[in-house]
Each structure stands twice: as structure tokens, then as C-alpha cells.
Amino acid sequence: MNENSFNEAYILKYNIGDFVPEENAFYHLCKREECDTRFVGRKNRAYCSSVCKSRVNNDKQFERQLVVSKQMSQLKKNQLILERLHQENPTKVQTKFLFQRGFDSEGVRRVVKLPDFGGTWFGFGNYAIQNQDDDTT
Ligand SMILES: [Zn+2]
């Protein structure tokens, strides 16, 4: 079956999702939001063409890269906040003080063990934080 073949008469005759006996296939509306193309194809086919399919995949890839780049800028911001607050070794600050400055402990971080200080620390670049029982970091 040609990828682009579609009989306009099906629009009146069938609903989206219906089986079309003439084609031994199903009537679809392309799942790419910006596309309004109707087509017939196998039951689980989602897109009218390989162009739409790859556009959707490219958009997903773009979204993933956007998430990564947002996480990277948050990591840079976190590092900068810790760098500015850092005075002695280790520095104690109230947790809310960090968050008020835009610190976000989710996303890019690593768990580090610091033999000199004990416990679990979360590393952000050159700095690491540890939550204390008295609500300081
Ligand atoms: Zn399409």
C-alpha cells in the first residue's frame, strides 16, 4: 500500500480507528499534533508518514536536550551559590537560606564520601553539602 494513498470517501464513511475492509487496514488521523492528515494503515500505525514520525522523534530528542541543559544551568547555579557561601571548612548555613537563593538539590548531583567529615555528602561540582539534624546544610 502506498504511504500516501487515501480515499477521501472514507472521511464520510468511517470514523477514526475504524477498520476499512476496502483496504484491509484501519482508518487513522496522524498522531503528530500539527498534522491533520488522515490515512489508512495497520492497526497500530501512529503517523501518516516517515516525515511525521521522525519529526515527533526529533521533537522528543529536543525536549530531552532541553531538560539536560536546564539541569546543567541549575548545577552551575548551585555551584555558584555554594561557592559564594563557602567561608570555612565546612560552612554551616540554614537550608532555607540556600533555597531562597535558588538552590535546587534535585537533578545533577553525586553522592560523595568525605573521610574527614563523615556521613553522606551530595556533591555539586567542587562543593558538597550535607543535611544536618538542626535543619542546616
Ligand atoms: Zn502526519
Image (spheres, grey):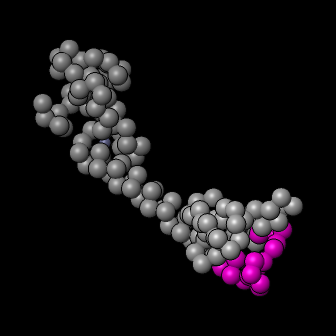
| Quadrant hosting ligand 1 | top left
Q: Position of residue 21 (x, y in %)?
A: 20, 14
Q: Is residue 83 left or right of residue 137?
A: left
Point 45% across, 56% down: residue: 63
Side (left or right) of 110 relative to 11: right
| Quarter of the N terminus within the rendering | top left
Q: Which residues are magenta?
A: 80-98
Q: Residue at x 70, y 66 (%)?
A: 118
Residue drawn 40% across the image and 52% down it? 60
Can residue 9 be seen by looking at this rendering? no
Question: Residue reaching furthest left?
Answer: 1
**Viewed as shown, does residue 106 lie left or right of 39?**
right
Q: Position of residue 54 (x, y in %)?
A: 29, 50
The x and y percentages for residue 33 are 42, 43
Which one is nearer the viewer's eye here, 76 or 44?
76
Please tell me whether residue 40 is drawn above or below residue 121 in the rendered image: above
Marker count (numbered): 0
Query: Seen in the image, is 34 located left or right of residue 123?
Result: left
Q: Is residue 123 visible?
A: yes
Residue shown at 34% from the left, 55% from the top: 58
Q: Position of residue 69 (x, y in %)?
A: 50, 67
Quadrant containing the C terminus is bottom right
**Quadrant in the rendering for residue 16:** top left
